[in-house]
Structure formats: C-alpha cells, structure tokens
Image (cartoon, rainbow, N blue to C red):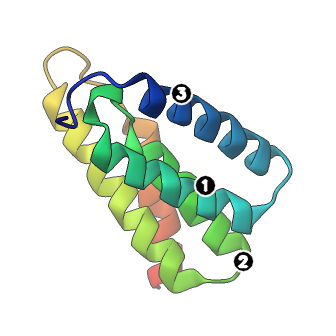
Amino acid sequence: MASDDWDDRKFNKWQKLRENFRVAKKEKDYNKLISIGNSILELDTNAKFIGIFVPLFQKEMADAYLNLNQNDKAIEYYQAALTGYKADREKRKTTAPDSWVKDISRLEKKLGKLLS
C-alpha cells in the first residue's frame, strides 16, 4: 500500500495522536508532547494522504524543548518548522499571499534570540 492510499487505521491513529498531543500541550507535559510529536512526524512519512501540516507540530516540539532547556533541539525544530512554513507559503503565494507571515516572523524572532 502506497503512503498516498487511504487507510482507516492510519487515519484513526492520526486522530488519536492529535488529541493526545493537544492534551499533552494543555497539561504542559513536554516530554510526552515531544514523544507524541515524533510519532506524528513518523506517521506523516507513512501516511501522506492525511496531509498533516508538519511545521505546526515541529514548532510546538521546539517550544517544548525550549521549556526543557534543550536549546540545541529547540533550534533544530524551530529551523525545520520555519523551513516548512516558508515552503508552504511559497506554494500558496498566489492564492494566499499573507499565509504564515506572523508565524514566520515569530519563529525568526525565537531563533534570533536562541542563536545570539
């Protein structure tokens, strides 16, 4: 089965992971959030049909790493999220020219502080 073929099991897994991610974020359980985030990133690799917007999760994982004082990992995930936001913005340039502008600006500021 190709990663673009619909698979109810993978979609149900996505629903559960997304809810668990939301709960971990609300509870400020940063280690759990990172673990679930990694599962979401892995699922995205194996289930492209879902259309997971990975940069959203990378940004949240970076925030979690920052809260855990793991600045190198935070930088890594902020940079990945920034790359993803910019790539999506480039794709949508003609249909949504203002997409992700604020998010990109925030990520650049966070990275600037961490890298200075």
* Type of amino acid at the residue the image marks with label 1: Ile
* Type of amino acid at the residue the image marks with label 2: Leu
Cα separation between marks 3 and 2: 30 Å
Q: Do the residues under discs 1 and 3 have CB atoms within 8 angstroms?
A: no
Q: Which mark is residue 89?
A: none
Q: Is residue 57 left or right of residue 43?
A: right
**46 over 81 or under it: above or below:** above
- Circle nearer the N terminus (3, 2): 3
Disc 3, SS: helix
Q: Which residue is mark 1?
A: 36
Q: Residue furthest right?
A: 27
Q: Which mark is residue 12?
A: 3
Q: In this view of the protein, which residue sits in the foreground, 105 or 8?
A: 8
Q: Residue furthest front?
A: 1
Q: Residues within 10 Å of mark 3 (few under 14, many from 20)?
A: few
**8 over 52 or under it: above or below:** above
Residue 59, image x, y percentages? 51, 54
Q: In this view of the protein, which residue sits in the foreground, 9 or 35?
A: 9
Locate residue 2: give its quadrant.
top left
**111 over 85 or under it: above or below:** below
Cα separation between marks 1 and 3: 15 Å
Is residue 105 at least partly visible in the picture? no
Q: Residue at x 22, y 37 (%)?
A: 3
Q: Nearer the viewer, mark 1 or mark 2?
A: 1
Q: Which mark is residue 68?
A: 2
